[in-house]
Amino acid sequence: MPGVSAPSAPVRRRPPWPALLAVPLAVLSALAVAFFGVIALAFSNGQLDDGAWLFVALPAVLALWLLVGVLLLLLGRSWLALFLPAAGLALVVVWGILDGTLGDGTGSTLVAVWVLPGLTALFTVLPGVRRWTAARRLARQSRD
């Protein structure tokens, strides 16, 4: 019949596998940032001069945002809320290396701290995850 659309297939409640991989990586990223932030504060004795406080405060804010993004992704509300802090955290690590603030004798650990949010961002931005969150959003809007 013209003008009558067929009912669409129900949207899966379970997130796709890349989203399920991004969640533990994001949590590990937040834990790593918290761990290294506490160590940075301990070794600095609270003397964060010349903008070094940015390398503690900015990752801490991004780590909290990561955890909020995890919740929003698992609920199917937003993939962007997890992608932005993950990509931002990966960029902060690169910025710290280029600035010389990070990287003194911490080669493999620093790579791990960079890879965790990088992979989180990569898995979050995959088309399957974006389609799933868009379908969940559309299903929520059609119910309202």
Image: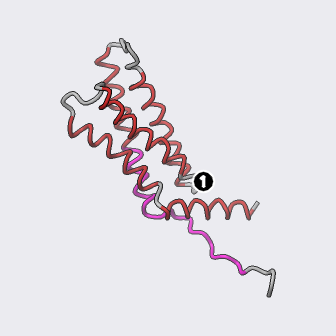
Colour theme: secondary structure
The x, y position of residue 72, in whole percent, is 56, 49
Q: Quadrant of residue 58?
A: top left
Q: Identify the residue at horizontal 43%, vertical 60% (top origin).
A: 18
In the image, 2: left or right of 62?
A: right
Relative to 79, residue 143 above or below? below
Q: Amino acid at mark 1?
A: Arg
Which residue is found at the position 36% from the left and 44% from the top?
A: 28
Quadrant in which residue 47 is drawn: top left
Q: Is residue 55 above or below residue 12?
A: above
Q: Residue at x 27, y 37 (%)?
A: 110
The percent position of residue 81, horizontal first and vertical second, equals 54, 46
User: In the rendered structure, does residue 10 fall within the stretch colored magenta?
Assistant: yes
51 drawn magenta: no
Asked whether 130 or 16 is in front, the reply is: 130
Q: What residue would you read off at disc 1? A: 77
Q: Nearer the viewer, residue 119 or 99?
A: 99
Across and down, in percent, residue 19 comes to 46, 58
- Give the secondary structure at mark 1: loop
Residue at 48% x, 36% y: name it.
Answer: 64
**The residue stretch that appears in magenta:** 6-28
Q: Residues within 10 Å of mark 1 (few under 14, many from 20)?
A: some
Quadrant in which the C terminus appears: bottom right
How many numbered callouts? 1
Residue 116 coordinates in the image, percent (x, y): 34, 46
Considering every residue shown, the one lying at the far front of the view is 98
Reply above or below: 47 against 131: above
Image quadrant where one finds the N terminus: bottom right
